[in-house]
Amino acid sequence: MKVLIMGASFGGMTAAYELRKRLSPGQCEIRVISKDPRFTFIPSLPWVALGSRSLDQISFDLAGSFTRKEIEFVHGGVTRIDPESRRVYTDAGEYAYDVLVIATGHRSANEAVPGLGPFDGPGHSLMSPPEAEEARDALQTFLGDPGPLVVGCAPGASCIGPAYEFVFQVDHLLRSRRMRHKVPIVFVTPEPFLGHFGVGGVGKARQFLEGEFEQRDIRYFTSAAVSRIAESAVDLADGTNFESAFSLFIPPLAGVKPLAEAPNLANPKGFVPVEENYRHQTFSDIYAVGVAVALPPVEQTPVPVNFPKTGHMTEQMARMAAHNIAARVLGNEKIARPLHAECILDMGDRAVMIKADPFRPPRNIARFSEGRHWLWAKKAFERYYLWRSRRGKTVAGEWGW
Ligand SMILES: Cc1cc2nc3c(=O)[nH]c(=O)nc-3n(C[C@H](O)[C@H](O)[C@H](O)COP(=O)(O)OP(=O)(O)OC[C@H]3O[C@@H](n4cnc5c(N)ncnc54)[C@H](O)[C@@H]3O)c2cc1C
């Protein structure tokens, strides 16, 4: 069986390693294609933007790690997928498959808000390594000539956590430099309340975050729809506007272009509709995992907020897809389990650990715990994850994020 995996981040890399654990090279040829030759630990991008990590410290070359596990790695961008003839076209050649795993993550839909940047407008973002580096450089310039700062998420955003991380960490940085009094901070979110996170809230997140924003003197606006980002101002759809010398916004996400363009493969946003075992709803030889998957919002909100797809959830999806693909060869039972999530949010001086099981309410477990030890746990987990994955190993599903 020939398995072709598109993408080599949390979804693609985990699917490849987990499949190799279950099937030998004689049973399954695995080929991974990625437009990026390096794996980057994306959850550390806020630290890159704040200047406490370099990209080199949180990434490694993929080719050697895959070769170790007898997995072929192709560095190339997928340009077209033909599900009927089971072929994928890339700028490095054309490849046939028996089973395809789509793990291409997202495209930032910056066009949703005029000015949402950085490369499309004056605003900043941290959704990708180049954007986080751009934000770092811009923040350094801002620190030399500080002014009002606006942080938030655009309508339809799903990856809400990094906006909270950035605003808390920048607040901490400014206080530690005794500059906070020069920087009024505003937080703007489409969430109906702080700590909604696109999942209807988790435990006492709302009360905790409201208290923390008040304590830190950060003004916040919920159910707010940012409508324009300019050099020195941020506008909301209801006519409110804020002066800003630096703004950073999380955009809404879409599926990558080749998915959006392939007939019947993806929904209008370019996300792939899957069954609960991560197999495509129409094409039985295609699986999708991670941010590329279409997952509906938990509820309608006055300003749209989408359901998040975290790295931890992406790994669970990749494990289930790998198990189910191997089951085609080994004849094991197929699995489909609800997703749970564990996440550590860095607040600068300490961190909070959020656990939700299942992620979609109602839940059996909704835990929200704060402390300095979570900050150390987050840093240790990043090192451990990079160490394991560089050696062709996955991290046990129950280990926290
Ligand atoms: C700033 C930030 C902080 C985050 N913090 C956390 C956190 O603390 N905890 C947590 O659990 N999650 C966190 N997340 C979410 C987490 O990073 C994502 O869930 C995870 O990266 C999704 O993995 P993925 O494999 O689906 O996609 P991605 O990580 O986006 O990877 C996509 C892969 O596909 C490849 N690709 C894309 N297009 C093509 C193409 N056309 N051809 C070939 N290859 C292609 C890319 O090169 C890449 O290898 C954070 C996200 C961001 C942006």
Image (cartoon, helix red, strand yellow):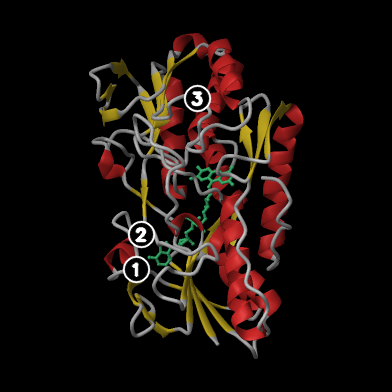
Residue pushed farthest right?
373
The C terminus, quarter of image:
top right
Is the residue under label 1 in contact with that under label 3 (CB below 8 Å)?
no
- Please state which of the two labelled residues, at mark 3 or mark 2, is closer to the viewer: 3
- Label 1 secondary element: loop
Q: Is residue 112 left or right of residue 101?
A: left
Is residue 54 at least partly visible in the picture?
A: no
The amino acid pointed to by label 3 is Leu
Q: Which one is nearer the viewer's eye here, 331 or 250?
A: 331
Is the residue under label 1 in contact with that under label 2 (CB below 8 Å)?
no
- Please state which of the two labelled residues, at mark 2 or mark 1, is closer to the viewer: 1
Is 181 drawn above or below residue 386 in the view shown?
above
The amino acid pointed to by label 2 is Val
Say if disc 2 is inside 8 Å of ligand 1.
Answer: yes
Residue at the image position 55 percent from the left and 44 percent from the top: 360
Q: What residue sits right under mark 2 in the picture?
A: 256
* Marker disc for residue 362: none
Q: Which one is nearer the viewer's eye here, 40 or 151?
A: 151
Is 313 drawn above or below residue 50 in the view shown?
below
* Marker disc for residue 194: 3
First along the sequence among labels 2 and 1: 2
Residue at the image position 70 percent from the left and 56 percent from the top: 397
- Label 3 secondary element: loop
Q: Position of residue 224 (x, y in %)?
A: 35, 25
